[in-house]
Amino acid sequence: MNRLMSNSNDEARDREATSAERGEHGEAIHEGGCACGAWRFVVSSEPDRIGLCHCMTCRKVHGSAFGAYAVYLAEQVSMSGATRAWQSSADGRRHFCTVCGSVAYMAFVNNDEIELPIGAFDETGFLEPTYELFCVHREPWLSADGRREYPEDRP
Ligand SMILES: [Zn+2]
Ligand SMILES: [Zn+2]
């Protein structure tokens, strides 16, 4: 976590200086941040996958019926601003803005993935979930609408 945070400021500045809207391989760059703006991020590629999660922890941290996350490799995400994290599972660490308390991102001790909440992005309409996790907890008034459904976590 600290490794990521300490690298992120420099990487974000480098990207701003060298590329306005495209990554080094021509990918679109997207930005986002928390509600107050103290924590910000830039992604340099398309996400590996995008999904909804109906697990009880996602429900509670978002204060909503589900969480929606775009999953990136840590090296594809640059961040600036402080977050704090708590251990939400054996491997999961959920970060939040220390100023406004917004959900920031989820990281893992056993892999290099970063999950960014779709709602944290500055733009709308370009991240479409293709699967849903922990559907055992899905509200009955929601439908999968063609997305792949998993009763619990991805196998
Ligand atoms: Zn904030
Ligand atoms: Zn979840």
Image: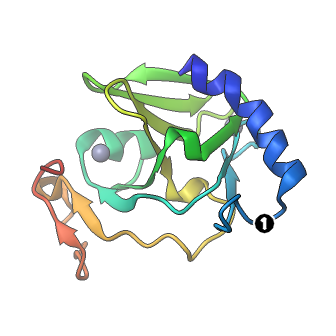
Residue 38 image position (x, y, % from top left): 76, 36
**Residue 64 appears in the figure:** yes
Q: Residue at x 49, y 22 (%)?
A: 85
Q: Which residue is drawn at 42% across and 46% down?
A: 63
Answer with the quadrant where ligand 2 appears in the image.
top left
Q: Disc 1 on helix, strand or loop?
A: loop
Q: Which residue is drawn at 52% across and 39% down?
A: 74
The residue beneath circle 1 is 21
Going by the image, does 38 lie left or right of 110?
right
Classify residue 146 by image quadrant: bottom left
Residue 8 image position (x, y, % from top left): 70, 32
Q: Is residue 53 above or below residue 6?
A: below
Q: In this view, does 120 lie above or below 86?
A: below
Residue 92 image position (x, y, % from top left): 34, 29
Going by the numbered disc 1, the residue's amino acid type is Glu
Q: In this view, does 47 lie above or below 126?
A: above
Residue 155 image position (x, y, % from top left): 12, 49
**Residue 98 appears in the figure:** no
Q: Which of 34 and 16 is in front in this view?
A: 16
